[in-house]
Amino acid sequence: MHKKKIKEIFIGSNNKGKLKEIADLLPKSLKIYSNLDYKIQSPIETGNTFQKNSLLKAKYFSKKTNKICLSDDSGIEIDILGKAPGVYSADWSGKKRNFNLAIRKVYKEIFKKDKNWKKKKITARFICVLTIFWPNGKFISKTGKIEGRISKSSKGKNGFGYDPIFIPKRKRLTFGEMDPEIKYGIDHRFEAFKKN
Ligand code: IMP
């Protein structure tokens, strides 16, 4: 993440789960600013791809703060649902961002597609596009992915969002059950971060 040249960075997100995860990935020597200091309203995510929304957010927060800004757009794609909720992952949790609601909707939609789904492997992946945007207009975007499957039931209290229903490939626990340090070292955000 161009660690040596950048001395301070603004993390453009109002999602506390993401904020914590991104801050943990960055070098400790970096001065981190976030919306906990600035209280800037998030922009409306008008893009129909992770790439467009990631860039839109990084640019918006950089213009507002005049700082180098790092933003993420991410979500979960569930193959049996035609890759939904995808870029609309946050929307499925409603205005109040209630992820119990979003998770119930996921199970309902999967059941509608296949009543015997619990006997099958419901493949899914988390995707993250991280964008770093400089006040001079330069930017870099990178994509990270982690493949996995949907668990038969919601499990674990760690993490945020869809963590309790996602089991990464070759693992037995959901992200919600996993030690956060283990999740941070393998997930979509880390994969995107490594490439920047
Ligand atoms: P957005 O990037 O602000 O549009 O929100 C993406 C949504 O995807 C989040 O609100 C979460 O619901 C979900 N999401 C993204 N990354 C993760 C993750 O690491 N764990 C669980 N849910 C995630």
Image: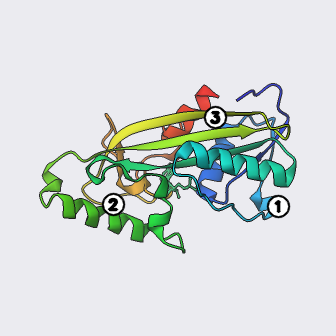
The crowding category of the residue bearing disc 1, from other C-alpha atoms within 10 Å (few below 14, some 14 to 19, many at least 20), is few
Please name the amino acid that badge 3 sits on: Ser
Residue at the (57%, 40%) spot, across then down? 129
CA–CA distance between discs 1 and 3?
Answer: 24 Å
Circle 1 is placed at which residue position?
38
Circle 3 is placed at which residue position?
141
In primary-sequence order, the first of circles 1 and 2 is 1
Q: Nearer the viewer, mark 3 or mark 2?
A: 3
Residues at discs 1 and 3 in contact (Cβ within 8 Å): no
In primary-sequence order, the first of circles 1 and 3 is 1
Circle 2 is placed at which residue position?
154
Residue at the (82%, 50%) spot, across then down? 63
Q: Quadrant of residue 8?
A: top right
Residue 20 percent across, percent down from the top left: 64, 51
Residue at the (69%, 62%) spot, across then down? 42
In the image, taking residue 92 as reference, residue 39 lies left or right, namely right
Q: Nearer the viewer, mark 1 or mark 2?
A: 1
* In the depicted structure, whether residue 123 falls above or below residue 19: above
Please name the amino acid that badge 1 sits on: Tyr
